[in-house]
Amino acid sequence: MKITMIGAGYVGLVSGVCFADFGHDVVCLDKDESKIAALKKGEIPIFEPGLAQLVAHNVAAGRLNFTTELTAAVAGSDVVFIAVGTPSRRGDGHADLSYVYAAAREIAANLSGFTVVVTKSTVPVGTGDEVERIIRETNPEADFAVVSNPEFLREGAAIEDFKRPDRIVIGVDGNGDRARAVMTEVYRPLYLNQSPLLFTSRRTSELIKYAGNAFLAMKITFINEMADLCEKVGANVQDVARGIGLDGRIGSKFLHAGPGYGGSCFPKDTLALVKTAQDHDSPVRLVETTVAVNDNRKRAMGRKVIAATGGDVRGRKVAVLGLTFKPNTDDMRDSPAIAIVQTLKDAGAEVTGYDPEGMDNARKLIDGIEYAKDPYEAAARAEALVIVTEWNEFRALDFARLKATMKTPLLVDLRNIYRKDEVTRHGFSYASVGRPD
């Protein structure tokens, strides 16, 4: 199959590279000339384990190319994926679909022969209908089908998720039989490995993506609220999570208490779902509450750090380890660290941060703090060390070295990656989330 991926961001690049690895002929297209130039030189604009090697392999094999020229790419394609950004719209929280619709217009003008146009971007219910209308209006003679095919990629494990998915959701309406045949061929390597292809209506497919992310966000928020209750009553949230997670109806994933969810998906998708539901007079109260509780939690974690220091951080140094919203990515979007650092700064703290991969992006979003080259430089003369993101290199810190360099040996572990006894035996005070410390 000849595939064009419009948008060489996180979703578009990972999806395009994986399709090329399946043997398809893929062109990744983006209007950002500097990004395309970098990709052509083998420079990857995002950090994702294994991605650079996969790009190099498929470029060398001649299956993967990068371009800024839409006309030729679309005209020769069997399938055109729209994988552009859908950020929260300023002012009202709805998903900003301007990039999706602009891509639809450009695609329409260059279609040649039967083409399946696929919305890979996360879009609200009904977006596919509007994409179809735009293409039909722009090019009444076009022979095409618009399909919804949401992505379910976890940053840090995206290649594994793409190649070994729990399911592949494909929403088809018009030209259903032809579109279904094309999409089955696109995913044939996965179908042969028995990855389930779930064919639905287009609107159902669009809602599946939002419903899935909202449910996971609620699960995270639920265990975070249980953690707060555990602290009040003297229970252990990790044992609570194990106890309920062993129930097959609940499952153990996404039951890890912490400073709240962030990233490129959960914050904007939960908010977009809330707005869509309100527009259709069918409010989703659980999701509305999830959004509010998660927003409040991030600053609450900053206040938790302040309380652990004795209630006053003015003029005192606090070291923050982990700035990205999760490990194995350089993504800073809606990271809890942003609100936590701001809370500490508002209270007068002098903050130093360190992250294994997110330093460049952090500098664009967090002003007024120092940045260190490693955890130990960050901890020098600090009166509190705070773990915000659970990178592996933070799981085996040298506490003797930390104690020698810190002004006050205090660890605030917002990810519960240590046990109290293994920290306190090194002479540290210790605070965590949802445990009787």
Image: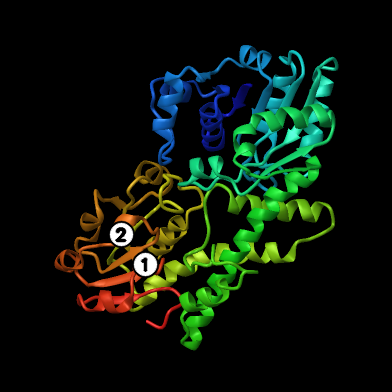
Answer with left or right where residue 380 lies relative to residue 390: left
Q: Is residue 381 above or below residue 66?
A: below
Is disc 1 surrounded by few (<14), some (14 to 19) or many (20+) residues within 10 Å? some
Q: Position of residue 286 (x, y in %)?
A: 70, 66
Q: Tell me the distance, in whole angstroms, between the alpha carbons under discs 1 and 2.
A: 9 Å
Depth order, front residue of 317/191 = 191
Q: Residue sitting at 83 percent across and 23 percent down?
A: 136
Q: Amino acid at mark 2?
A: Phe
Mark 1 in CB contact with mark 2 (< 8 angstroms): yes
* Quadrant placement of the N terminus: top right
Element type at mark 1? loop
Question: Can residue 16 be seen in this snapshot?
Answer: yes
Q: Amino acid at mark 1?
A: Ile
Of the residues under marks 1 and 2, which one precedes in the sequence? 2
Residue assigned mark 2 = 394
Quadrant of the rendered image containing residue 290: bottom right
Depth order, front residue of 6/187 = 187
Q: Is residue 60 above or below residue 411?
A: above
Answer with left or right where residue 215 lies relative to residue 172: left
